[in-house]
Image: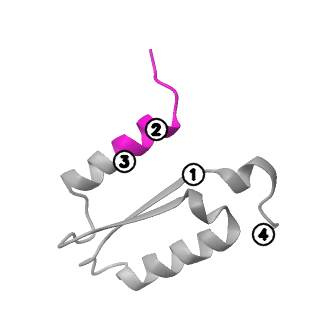
Amino acid sequence: QGPISGVNKEIPVLQCHGDCDPLVPLMFGSLTVEKLKSMINPANVTFRTYSGMMHSSCIEEMMDVKQFIDKHLPPVD
């Protein structure tokens, strides 16, 4: 567990979490995102929560993931 340095400190991160997740409580997601923000540029960390979502996914989350990929990765031919 060495320190994060160089270009890795600027990596964009999207973390998504349902507010009704019975397996991984939202509090753990919140703690994780705060830890990430202490390790890399906090401006590059995005935390999204989804109302009523359990330990699963929803269309809103998938749209956020698509937007994140479209923004940060080059298009595939």
Which amino acid does the dot numbered 1 rest on? Answer: Pro
The residue that label 4 is drawn on is: 1
Helix, strand or loop under label 2: helix
The residue that label 2 is drawn on is: 71
Cα–Cα gap, marks 4 and 3: 28 Å
Residues under numbered marks 1 and 2 in contact, where contact means CB atoms less than 8 Å apart: yes
Residues under numbered marks 3 and 2 in contact, where contact means CB atoms less than 8 Å apart: no
Q: Which mark is residue 12?
A: 1
Secondary structure mainly formed by the magenta segment: helix
Counting residues from the start of the chain, the first of labels 3 and 2 encountered is 3
Counting residues from the start of the chain, the first of labels 4 and 1 encountered is 4
Helix, strand or loop under label 1: loop
Which amino acid does the dot numbered 3 rest on? Answer: Val
Cα–Cα gap, marks 1 and 3: 12 Å
- Asked if the magenta segment contains residue 66, the reply would be yes
The residue that label 3 is drawn on is: 65
